[in-house]
Image (cartoon, helix red, strand yellow):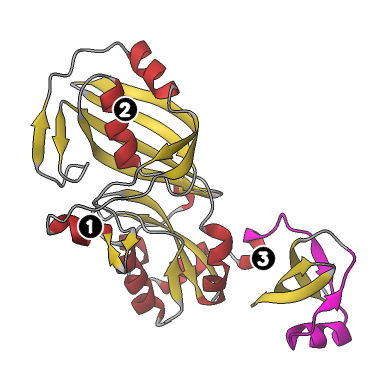
Amino acid sequence: MDGVLIINKPKGYTSHDIVNIIRKELHIKKVGHTGTLDPNATGVLPILIGNATKISKYLIEHDKTYIAEIKLGEKTTTGDSEGEIIETRNAEKNQPEKIQEVLTKFLGKQKQTPPKFSAIKINGKKAYEYARTGQDIKLEQREIEIFSINLLSYENNNIKFKVKCSKGTYIRTLCEDIAETLGTVGYMNSLERIQVDNFHIEKSVTIEQIRNNSILIEKNIISIEEIFRKCEKIELNDYKLNLFLNGVQLTFNQPEAVYRIYNKSTFIGLGVIHNNLLKRDVIV
């Protein structure tokens, strides 16, 4: 069983918790995910099963879409609802037009400093491990990009918005920055990831649905062939296929890219062309 299963992760579960559940349900060790989703966040978590664990390098760079909520007027230690309140400030009543105007200011490429309570590693330790012991750490800024950001609702000092952003964007930090631009403080009150590239929440399944239901899991797995359906095909005869499977690089005068490899119309896996040479990558 090889492919991707889109899980709608519930609040309170780590990404690794979900991986372990799938391992137990399918009795398979080769299970992974494409990027951590915080325990207090919900939504799309693509789970890689079997040989699909080998395609994670193609999926971790994908853009993501979230629905987030900011609680204005309070700042917490962690930047979200799990932390302790360390500052309160008056949050003036804002008009939706003004809020959207502020949100629009965050469009495009920019530098962002990750939160101290994050999983970024510094000298072999995660940033939140330093933060929990009160150690002061310096986190380097990273370049991110906001592709779209729109106000969904504003009520009782709570701003709900939808944002599409690049890999590496911390929505907690974005929420704090938005609040500051509005002249107050704030924290991320809730977060739902609704899309990771072409993986949509509408196509997801819940943990409750798949428990003790391996048939439902198999029914909802997206095959490696389907995931790479937009890649060009290369048909190999028996002789070239044998060379290919044994690691021999084959000469192909075609553009550098990832290709779907077939033999007699049967999907074999993925190959990569570099410097006019085709080499094996993922075999199903």
Helix, strand, or loop for circle 3?
Answer: helix
Q: Residue beneath label 2, please?
A: 178
Q: Is residue 238 magenta?
A: yes
Q: Is residue 172 magenta?
A: no
Considering only vertical position in the picture, is 52 above or below 186? below
Alpha carbon separation for disc pair 2 and 3: 41 Å
Q: Nearer the viewer, residue 236 or 125?
A: 125
- Disc 2 crowd, CA 10 A, few/some/many (<14, 14-19, 20+): many
Q: Position of residue 109 (x, y in %)?
A: 51, 35
Helix, strand, or loop for circle 1?
Answer: helix
Identify the residue at horizontal 57%, vertical 67% (top origin): 55
Identify the residue at horizontal 62%, vertical 66% (top origin): 224
Q: In this rendering, would 50 be left or right of 39?
A: right
Viewer-side label of 3, 1? 1
Q: Specify the segment rendered in magenta.
A: 227-253
Q: Nearer the viewer, residue 170 or 221?
A: 170
Q: Position of residue 252 (x, y in %)?
A: 88, 70
The three-letter amino acid code for the residue at tag 1 is Tyr
Considering only vertical position in the picture, is 136 above or below 85? below
- Disc 3 crowd, CA 10 A, few/some/many (<14, 14-19, 20+): some
Q: Given contact means CB atoms under 8 Å apart, are the residues at marks 2 and 3 in contact?
A: no
Q: In this rendering, would 147 be left or right of 101?
A: right
